Amino acid sequence: MTKKRLGIGFIGIVLVLILAAPSFAQVIKLRLADQNPPQGWGPVNALQPWIKKVEAATKNRVKIEVYPSQTLCKGPDTWNAVKSGVADMGWCNHGYWPEMTSLFETITLPGLPCRSSEHGSGVLYQLYEKFPSIQKEFKDVHPVLMWTSPPRFLITTKRLVKTMEDMKGLKLRISGGPPSDQLKAFGAIPIQMGMMDIYEAMSKGVIDGTDSSWEAISSFKFYEVAKNYTFTNLSLYVFSIIMNKEKWDDLPKDIQQAITSVSGLEGSKLFGRNWYDDIEPSVIEKIKKEGIAMNTYTLPPEEVKRWRSVAGEPVWKNWVKKMEGKGLPEAQQILNTTLEMLEK
């Protein structure tokens, strides 16, 4: 009798293990395409901590494998790579596709009163939640996070820019859309290229400089080839982490909820803060330690006013007119709401 009971008990244990085995085996692996170097400030301080939050929230049922430095796809190809399933997730700079997510990029209009990346990121996510027309621009993918850079400043290789006239004729790498329109209004020549190509283009004189943030200066070592810094509020950029729509829809509901719990509004604000807002002192210290010169100039208020009068509000009006001509009548309402949210 005892042997029989032992046998039944053993069979029961085996059945339990067999039934439990799928839950241990079902680790969902997601490939995330990222154009940034893995040792960069943003990946270290924002992307990797967020991935750990996702894995903890899903109790390690989700593992995100990052393919950095464009190893899975080029930065400008990320949206289509995610949409087609080449990547499960992707880090996106929307400036690569200015005609695709135009309303989402309202916040990139020059001269808007954005105080920081965290501030802009919170407003950006709330705009997405509020306007179905913005949500429609993401219909082919599933947005997980969205954030902004702080307003960017100018770095140049030869000429220290002090006035609007100094901008004329400069070939500057810039994102498409409103940031590009701003440079055209100054008489500069906007050039679009991937982030990984900017360093070489500046070092060889193909471009005269770029708009930038401290994070990009650090991660891509722009300080080695561009030593002139003009501090003023140019346009900011918008970013997102998106996921293949079918892949998202196939996830169990509890996994979707777990990922969303560490993403959304709070996750987007965290990305803005950790990717951009806390880095400036360490970058300046790093440049000084390496003994590299910095020629700096802060635009005085009267020149800031001139820049805004030429390439601020006029660009807003032209942008609204262009959007309405494309059949997007909500453009003015979205701009007004953006201004209201940013001014709070």
Image (cartoon, grey):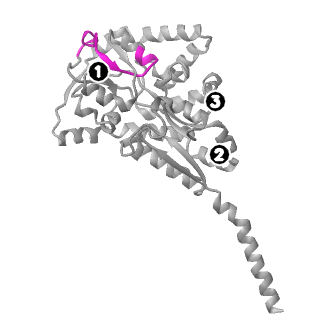
Residue at mark 3? 140
For the residue marked with disc 1, what is the amino acid? Answer: Val
Q: Nearer the viewer, residue 231 or 100?
A: 100
Q: Position of residue 339 (x, y in %)?
A: 49, 20
Q: Is residue 319 positioned above or below 206 on the image?
A: above
Q: Position of residue 340 (x, y in %)?
A: 51, 21
Kindly report the distance in space between the C-alpha atoms of the residues bearing marks 3 and 1.
Answer: 36 Å
Residue drawn at point x = 58 percent, y = 7 percent = 325
- Asked if the stretch drawn in magenta spans residue 166, the answer is yes
Earlier-in-chain disc, 1 versus 2: 1
Q: Is residue 271 positioned above or below 213 on the image?
A: below
Q: Are marks 3 and 1 in contact (CB under 8 Å)?
A: no
Boundaries of the magenta span: 162-180
Residue at mark 2? 256
| In this picture, residue 80 sits left or right of residue 235 | right
For the residue marked with disc 3, what is the amino acid? Answer: Asp
